[in-house]
Each structure stands twice: as structure tokens, then as C-alpha cells.
Image: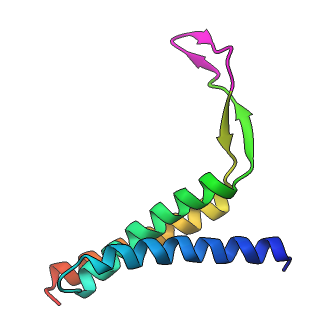
Amino acid sequence: MSKVEMTRIIAAGLLVGGIFAFMISYIEVVTPSNFFGWLAFSIATGAIAFFAIFSPYGVRSHTTVFGRRQKYRHPVSNIPGKIAGQILIAVVVCCAISFGFYAYGK
């Protein structure tokens, strides 16, 4: 693993951990339900922030809008589908665990 990759992994962990710690610090009573719910929120927002900062940008345009081809192009971050899928799975699993604890009153 290169130094750049390690820096990005540490930055992602710090973003998610910082958001999670900030949100948990405002909760009076931490239950398993809100722990996993805020963890899901932290992973999702941390991923958005990480890709906004570190993702390489490509230039794309919408092909057609209302039947007209678009002339302008705008920067869009290139996020690999495999990475986005793993993030989505982590968020969905945390939400499911949170709901399980909420529904069964633990």
C-alpha cells in the first residue's frame, strides 16, 4: 500500500469517526438502536465528504434534456461502483441492525 492510499484511508476513518463522535456526543442516552442509526448516518455523510474531497473528477453532461442535447459539461466525481456498493451495504446493514434493536426494544 502506498503512502497516498494510507493517507486516504486514514482521512476516511477520521471523517467518519469525527462525524460519529460529534453526533453521539449530543445524545443523552446512547442505546444500541441510535448507536447503529448514527453510525449509518456517519458512514454515509463521511463517504460523501471523502469523495467530495479526494475523488478524481471527470467532465460529463446529460445527453438529452426535454429532447435537446446539452451543450455544457460539468464536473462529476468518478466513484467506482464496487466502492459505492460496499458503502451502501454498510449503511443498509447498520440501518437494519438499528431497526432491529428499535423494534424489539433493546
- Colour scheme in the image? rainbow
Residue interval drawn in magenta: 63-73
Main secondary-structure element of the magenta-colored stretch:
loop
Q: Which residue is drawn at 49% across and 78% down?
A: 17
Q: Nearer the viewer, residue 58 or 93?
A: 58
**Residue 20 image position (x, y, % from top left):** 41, 75
> In the rendered image, is residue 97 in sight?
no
Pick out the residue farthest to the top: 68
Q: Is residue 64 above or below residue 93?
A: above
Pick out the residue farthest to the right: 2
Q: Which residue is drawn at 62% across and 25% down?
A: 62
58 lies left or right of 106: right
> In the rendered image, is residue 86 in sight?
yes
88 lies left or right of 74: left
**Residue 94 image position (x, y, % from top left):** 39, 76
Q: Does the magenta stretch include residue 56?
A: no
Q: Is residue 71 magenta?
A: yes
**Residue 70 image position (x, y, % from top left):** 64, 15
Q: Is residue 42 above or below residue 84?
A: below
